Image: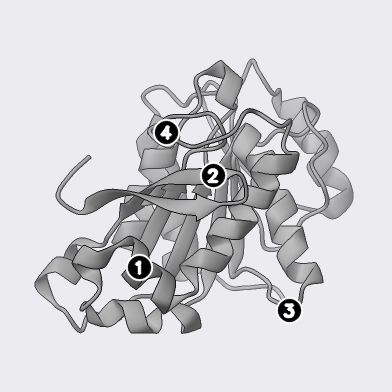
């Protein structure tokens, strides 16, 4: 954690949800800094050590800070000081949706983060696009959140899936501009499983050579891929 990170708790469907909120460095220096959006990031499996402090999730948070997003990393049910217990993705999806709605409300930020209640960016949040990112189990929950938001008529800006859960959990079809990043040597969710899921959707899979499921010594590659996509992307029609 650094000086640009704050840990807060908000009221959720089954009790408190612990959040880590990461701010762009520029926001500290320029109160009128124009944010690009908000990034909601979902961590790996709660029963296998997954938390908001996972290194891949932290990498995503820092990368989107660099792209002028405020990053929000919630702990799923039963992780850290978040209330509740593991619910096989159902309750986790409800909580992630709840957090996505909370992120759009200036009044909610002012209530739950009073130290920043006078900051100019808070009044922008209702108009900022929402990016959803997930790693492993988080890709399962995040992809279902993305589809729920589409069904509700308020789609996310974009979806980023790292070490996607294809073949391990019921990963749905996703928007055509979804960014899928996977390790060549992933032993938990094989590249073949990801290709089998992506092929019918004609999704491009960004493969990081030599990377395992946790992207040991390859986290910088995730960052480079996202920066390249965001800073030079052409969105499909």
Secondary element at image label 3: loop
Q: Earlier in the sequence, mark 3 or mark 4?
A: 4
Dot 1 crowding, Cα within 10 Å, few <14, some 14–19, many 20+: few
Q: Where does residue 48 sit, x and y in percent of width and height?
A: 56, 17
Q: CA distance from mark 4 to mark 1?
A: 19 Å
Q: CA distance from mark 2 to mark 4?
A: 10 Å
Quick check: 151 above or below 46?
below
To which residue does mark 2 refer? 15
Between the residue at mark 2 and the residue at mark 1, the CA separation in whole angstroms equals: 16 Å
Q: Going from the N terminus, do you reach mark 2 or mark 4 first? A: 2
Q: Residue at x 68, y 72 (%)?
A: 155
Position in image of residue 170 (x %, y %): 83, 37
Q: Which mark is residue 81?
A: 4
- Whole-Å distance between the Cαs marked 2 and 3? 41 Å
Q: Nearer the viewer, residue 201 or 152?
A: 152
Who comes first in sequence, dot 2 or dot 1? 2
Earlier in the chain: of badge 4 and badge 1, it is 4
Q: Are marks 3 and 4 in contact (CB under 8 Å)?
A: no
Residue where numbered disc 1 is placed: 111
Q: Which residue is mark 3?
A: 237
**Mark 1 secondary-structure assignment:** helix
Q: Secondary structure at mark 4?
A: loop
Q: CA distance from mark 3 to mark 4?
A: 42 Å
**Residues tagged 3 and 1 counted as in contact (Cβ below 8 A):** no
């Amino acid at each position: 954690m650094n000086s640009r990170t704050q840990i807060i708790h908000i009221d959720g469907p089954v009790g408190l949800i612990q959040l880590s909120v990461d701010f762009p460095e520029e926001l500290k220096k320029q109160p009128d800094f124009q944010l690009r959006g908000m990034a909601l990031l979902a961590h790996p499996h709660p029963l296998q050590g997954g938390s908001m402090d996972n290194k891949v999730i932290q990498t995503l948070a820092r990368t989107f800070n660099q792209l002028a997003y405020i990053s929000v990393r919630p702990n799923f049910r039963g992780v850290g000081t978040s209330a509740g217990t593991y619910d096989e993705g159902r309750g986790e999806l409800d909580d992630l949706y709840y957090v996505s709605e909370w992120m759009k409300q200036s009044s909610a930020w002012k209530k739950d983060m009073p130290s920043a209640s006078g900051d100019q960016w808070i009044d922008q949040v209702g108009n900022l696009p929402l990016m959803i990112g997930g790693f492993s189990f988080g890709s399962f929950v995040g992809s279902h959140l993305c589809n729920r938001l589409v069904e509700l008529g308020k789609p996310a800006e974009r979806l980023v899936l790292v070490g996607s859960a294809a073949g391990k959990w019921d990963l749905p079809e996703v928007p055509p501009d979804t960014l899928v990043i996977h390790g060549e040597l992933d032993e938990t969710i094989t590249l073949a499983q990801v290709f089998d899921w992506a092929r019918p959707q004609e999704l491009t899979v960004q493969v990081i050579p030599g990377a395992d499921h946790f992207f040991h010594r390859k986290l910088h590659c995730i960052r480079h891929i996202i920066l390249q996509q965001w800073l030079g992307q052409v969105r499909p029609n």
